[in-house]
């Protein structure tokens, strides 16, 4: 099963940026990802999303984690599915 989850990037002890990745459920948080689909910077409150790829992965059955679901909901991704 594939999940859309956050992957930490940036300096040690200070995660300045998170990548939003499609990753196998059995992989660890910093493990090898299948696809990079965007990034999220909580300090600057910036988000970049590859919307067509995210919609494709969601249609194929990828499940977003809670935090990624909230980010996608703010970006109004789920309105495009309907």
Image (cartoon, rainbow, N blue to C red):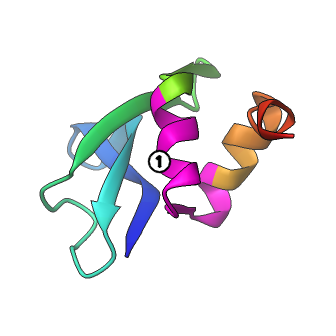
Q: Is residue 2 magenta?
A: no
Relative placement, left or right, of 10 versus 5 is: left
Crowding at dot 1, Cα within 10 Å, few <14 / some 14-19 / many 20+, comes out as some
Residue at the image position 57 percent from the left and 26 percent from the top = 43
Rendered position, 13 above or below 3: above
Check the image and name the residue furthest to the left. Answer: 32
Residue at the image position 36 percent from the left and 42 percent from the top = 15
State the image coordinates of residue 69 (x, y, percent, origin top left). Answer: 68, 53
Q: Is residue 60 magenta?
A: yes
Q: Quadrant of residue 36?
A: top left
Q: Which residues are magenta?
A: 53-68
Rendered position, 16 above or below 3: above
Q: Nearer the viewer, residue 78 or 11?
A: 78
Which residue position is annotated with label 1? Answer: 57
Residue at the image position 59 percent from the left and 17 percent from the top = 44
Q: Nearer the viewer, residue 32 or 51?
A: 51
State the image coordinates of residue 72 (x, y, percent, origin top left). Answer: 69, 40
Relative placement, left or right, of 6 versus 35 is: right
Q: Quadrant of residue 66?
A: bottom right
């Amino acid at each position: 099963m594939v999940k859309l989850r956050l992957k930490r990037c940036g300096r040690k002890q200070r995660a300045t940026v998170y990548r939003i990745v499609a990753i196998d459920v059995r992989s660890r948080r910093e493990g090898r990802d299948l696809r990079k689909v965007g990034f999220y910077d909580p300090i600057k409150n910036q988000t970049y999303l590859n919307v067509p790829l995210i919609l494709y992965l969601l249609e194929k059955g990828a499940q977003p984690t809670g935090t990624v679901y909230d980010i996608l909901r703010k970006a109004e991704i789920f309105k495009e599915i309907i």
